[in-house]
Image (spheres, rainbow, N blue to C red):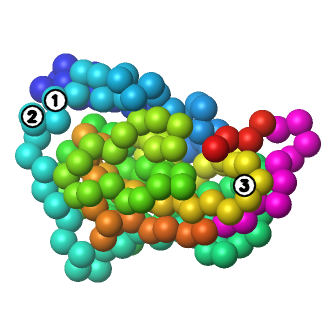
Amino acid sequence: MTLLLSLVLAGCGGADEATAPPMPAEPAAQEAPAEAAHEGMDHDAHAFVALDGDGKRVFFQAPADGATVTSPLAVVFGAEGVEVKPAGTMEPNTGHHHLVIDGAPVAAGEAVPADATHIHYGKGQTETEIELAPGQHTLTMQLADGMHRSYGPDFSATITVTVEGAAEGAEAAP
């Protein structure tokens, strides 16, 4: 079990999150190739336990839905009734955030993909900075368990933002 937990933590950004403050990161720093994101994880080793919706929710603290923003933009995740913990933590009423750019929530029990549009925050981060191309984008925050299995649409939040233009010298993501 200890080996599995070590592999999970190593594959999801490290085990020292408890002593270091959450660091905002750009998507490239958070992404892992899809085939490597869940490497070493035995998703069947832990039974999936869905969260009940009683008093629990996730939401965006920033930006506001419908906001016109510039890139890069700060994104702040919020959660009530559930504790945000690093990936690998398999405790009741815990999970960590994922950001889906221009995509839909992930069905309950399914592993959140790891690619350019599904960004994992496996260290338990609650804020980040992302770069987006000019135009309208949907941002969906998806809460998942310690094995990256989605808690489903009931534990997601979606907002729409319009990006006016990338900051000078910045490369924009999808």
Residue 56 vs residue 73, the one in the foreground: 73
- Amino acid, disc 2: Ala
Residue that badge 2 annotates: 45
Vertical placement of residue 87 versus 160, above or below: above
Residue that badge 1 annotates: 42
Q: Tag 3 or tag 1, which sits nearer the N-term?
A: 1
Task: Please name the residue shown 61% across and 75% down the image.
Answer: 65
Majority secondary structure of magenta residues: strand
Q: Marks 2/1: CA distance?
A: 5 Å
Residue 61 vs residue 137, the one in the foreground: 137
Q: Is mark 3 on a helix, strand or loop?
A: strand
Q: Does the magenta stretch include residue 62?
A: no
Task: Please name the residue shown 20% across and 45% down the image.
Answer: 90
Q: Tag 3 or tag 2, which sits nearer the N-term?
A: 2
Task: Please name the residue shown 13% across and 50% down the image.
Answer: 48
- Amino acid, disc 1: Asp
Q: Is residue 19 left or right of residue 36?
A: right
Extent of the magenta region? 161-170
Q: What element carries label 2?
A: loop
Q: Marks 2/3: CA distance?
A: 37 Å
Q: Determine whether label 2 and label 1 are within 8 Å by CB.
A: yes
Residue 73: give its label.
3
Vertical placement of residue 143 versus 46, above or below: below
Give coordinates of residue 70: x percent, y percent: 80, 57
Q: Is residue 6 visible?
A: no
